[in-house]
Amino acid sequence: MAHPLTTRLQRRAGCGARRRGLLTATLTAALALPAAAASAPNGTWLSQPQIWFYSSKGLLPQVMAQIRAQRYRVVFLDYRKVSDAVQRQVASEARRQGLIPVVWIQSPQYRRMGIADLVHAARHGDGIQVDDHFFANYTLASFYHLRQVYTKPIFCSIQPFQRGTLPRSGCNQLDVQCYTTQTFQGCVKLADQLGAVVSLSSQNTIGYQPSLGGRAFNTFLWSDRTL
């Protein structure tokens, strides 16, 4: 017969697993790409300097509200050298505004980050983003290891020439970086083939947004002209 304490711990573990599963299912449903006549904002990035600026000026509520007002659903966050307290504050404010805070792992190869380091870096987010730097410097086995140990959604981001580095499964959402005008049309076709979000550059390709039809798009980086 099981010890009562063991039974209680097992019940707690089961409840925790169910809660994690519910969170993942809820976020996965929220990330389903909408079918619409007009292009649909999906996500935008906040860089480390932007996070430092908004947090130090007390402007996090305003910027998150502005991002949500532009109909974005996801905010990708560069948390390098950002304190735990600020990371929690940023993620909390994003959630309060109805956004999904996703930790963007910038250049992990330069920091010699292992999979455990990636999981730890994303501890305050509701998802993790691995981008072209990850797929250029880590093996598919490393990605599948991350998928095995990380229970929240994984956002994958590639450059157009990296199609061959993609895992067969494990990305909850994929975007293709269509950042140059010369290759833009081919990049959009690739995104269509992969069922991916089209990521636009706020400097080079944001002007193509009206031509996207019903496609979902990201904007790199968030461009704020009011604060």
Image (tube, rainbow, N blue to C red):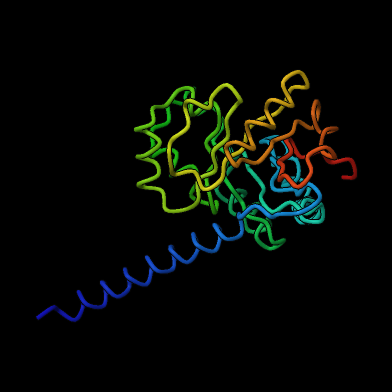
Residue at the image position 54 percent from the left and 24 percent from the top:
162
Count of numbered circles on the image: 0
Relative to the observer, which residue lies in front, 179 or 190?
Answer: 190
The reply, left or right, for residue 116 in relation to residue 85 is left
Give coordinates of residue 69: x percent, y percent: 82, 56
Residue at the image position 26 percent from the left and 72 percent from the top:
9
The reply, left or right, for residue 116 in relation to residue 52 is left
Q: In the rendered image, which quarter is residue 98 located in? A: bottom right
Give coordinates of residue 190: x percent, y percent: 63, 31
The reply, left or right, for residue 70 in relation to residue 218 is right
The reply, left or right, for residue 116 in relation to residue 59 is left
Relative to the observer, which residue lies in front, 51 or 160?
Answer: 160
Is residue 124 depicted above or below 133 in this figure? below
Give coordinates of residue 58: x percent, y percent: 77, 51
Is residue 189 depicted above or below 70 in this figure? above
Relative to the observer, which residue lies in front, 93 or 176?
Answer: 176
Residue at the image position 74 percent from the left and 27 percent from the top:
185
Q: In the rendered image, which quarter is residue 89 located in? A: bottom right
Quarter the N terminus occupies: bottom left
Give coordinates of residue 97: x percent, y percent: 72, 61
Residue that protrudes farthest toward the right in the picture = 226
Residue at the image position 45 percent from the left and 23 percent from the top:
137
Is residue 6 depicted above or below 76 in this figure? below
Quarter the C terminus occupies: top right
Is residue 65 depicted above or below 203 in this figure? below
